[in-house]
Image: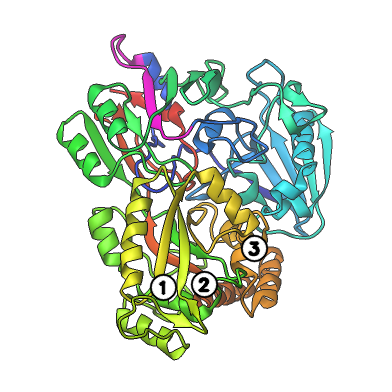
Amino acid sequence: MKVRHRAAIIGIVASVMILLAGCSAGEKATTAADTAPANVPSELIYATAKDIQDMNPHIYSGSMPAQGMVYESLVENAKEGIQPMLAESWEISVDGKMYTFHLRKDVKFHDGEPFNAEAVKLNFEAVLQNAEKHSWIKLTTKLTDIRVVDEFTVELTLSEPYYPALMELSMTRPFVFLSPKDFKNGGTKDGVNGFHGTGPYVLAEHRIDQYAVFEANDSYWGGAPAIKKVTAKVLPAGETTYLALLKGEVNFVFTDDRGADSIDVEAMKQLEKTGDYQVVRSEAMNTKMIVANTSQTASPVSETVVREAIWHAIDRETISRDIFGGVETPAKKLFSDNVPYANPDLKPRGYDLNAASGLLEKAGWSLTEGEQIRVKNGKPLAASLYYDSNSASQKTQAEFIQSELKSIGMELTVIGEESSSIASRRSSGDYDLLFNQTWGLAYDPQSTIAAFTSASSYLHATSGIAEADELYRKIEDVMVSTDETARTSLYADIMAIVHDEAVFIPITSGGVTVVAPSQLQGIAFKQTQFELPFEHMHFE
């Protein structure tokens, strides 16, 4: 006997930290396109501080919003749960090990190749050929067989039940589909020959570090988009982007998938006052945080008490009010309350400089009269914090936190680097502290927590704590749990361990803030923060 799942597709939108554009779950873009007057705009030009980079959907260097326009998954993650996308329906076997997907029959890749079960098999096998790169996605370790049943039916077999399977299949990458004609050497891990997906937009032109042009896929199975062209224009964040918006050189902005904000809150307010732009905000989607490298034994941050002191020394209320203008709210824990399983009873740890100083003093970090930096066994209390150089808000936060930590006798060096460099540091463990954010509402808690065990993500952050082995065992258990009560208990234990050890120091809870032309209609929000479905947008 099998359990059958059917549901209607709904439109939803997403993104990262501050400034992001979204689209409506309401009327279809085709309707807007058919009824729009000839003089209504049909192009959106967004500013991005980073080039879209490699659009190969099976690796991680490319822009996720850009990839989200071109490529699609079998299913999508919505507020109502997992919904159909390229798969119209599916069944899950009673033992939870077999997923049978029934594909749409009206889909073609941008190069005209048919989307079918064979294309699904080839793409999934290409992902698995590069399994080490995808180690943070546990589904890659559970998939044992991909079988073509018939032209539009594909069967996935897992080694054991894995409850996040559908959620991981819904992600922006890597389980999305590229035309097999674009494969190189029979796969995608060595690069690709083209970027032809099944999505609503086609990558038409790309000039590195200048712009990328996406044109509407008029044969799109979901209906031709009303917005006929989307251009990603590379501009320095801050004043340059703000002035470009005022001049009409670009007409909306959003933070990229790495969390870099193109303009600050004050600039948003000024744009809104002109009447040419609207600002719309979502509920909390992610948590901005400082990640501590517990395995960096040469650094003071390898001590739990130092991490706790840093936590106490950060004035989140001031960051929320003065840096984010209230758009982001103070975060007290790793996940906000609207994330599933994220309500365990955790000990409070608020802003308290006296508590921070007391903890350090008791742990032997002494402050000699006349000195500004504490010392323990001849070693200064000093660390480095890395932030994204393309994010104005991260730089401001880093400097504010630097000042706060100095008041408790800790020297913090703040260093701005490209997001790719920071990602490399996270993977190699070459850092003390760095800014990051949780995966987001549609992905959490399972994706962020799975990343605790991944060498490419947070393994260095978690491996230095005393309870590391217990933490990893519980993570493995929760991902294969079939009992809801047991799963809830395991998540509570996992969150308590990293909270008590102060591994991930929360700063603010961030949603999506849309800054878009005032006449742009249908702005709403997705569960995921990594895609911008422009196909549902239209100008009034």
Q: Earlier in the sequence, mark 3 or mark 2?
A: 2
Q: Earlier in the sequence, mark 3 or mark 1?
A: 1
Quadrant showing the C terminus: top left
Q: Secondary structure at mark 2?
A: helix
Image depth: mark 3 or mark 2 in front: 2
The residue lying furthest to the bottom in this view is: 362
Q: Residue 260 appears at what percent x and percent y?
A: 42, 44
* Residue tagged 2: 301
Find residue 459 and name its label: 3
The three-letter amino acid code for the residue at tag 2 is Val
The three-letter amino acid code for the residue at tag 3 is Leu
Quarter of image, res 513: top left
In the depicted view, which residue is nearer to us: 174 or 27? Answer: 174
Classify 55 as above or below 423. above
Q: Secondary structure at mark 1?
A: helix
Mark 1 is surrounded, within 10 Å at the Cα level, by few (under 14), some (14 to 19) or many (20 or more) other residues, namely: many
Q: Residue 455 appears at what percent x and percent y?
A: 68, 58
* Segment colored magenta: 35-50
Mark 2 is surrounded, within 10 Å at the Cα level, by few (under 14), some (14 to 19) or many (20 or more) other residues, namely: many
Classify 154 as above or below 281. above
Q: Secondary structure at mark 3?
A: helix
Residue drawn at (30%, 36%) of the image:
515
Quadrant showing the N terminus: bottom right
In the depicted view, which residue is nearer to us: 1 or 198? Answer: 198
* Residue tagged 1: 310
Q: Is residue 464 left or right of residue 258?
A: right
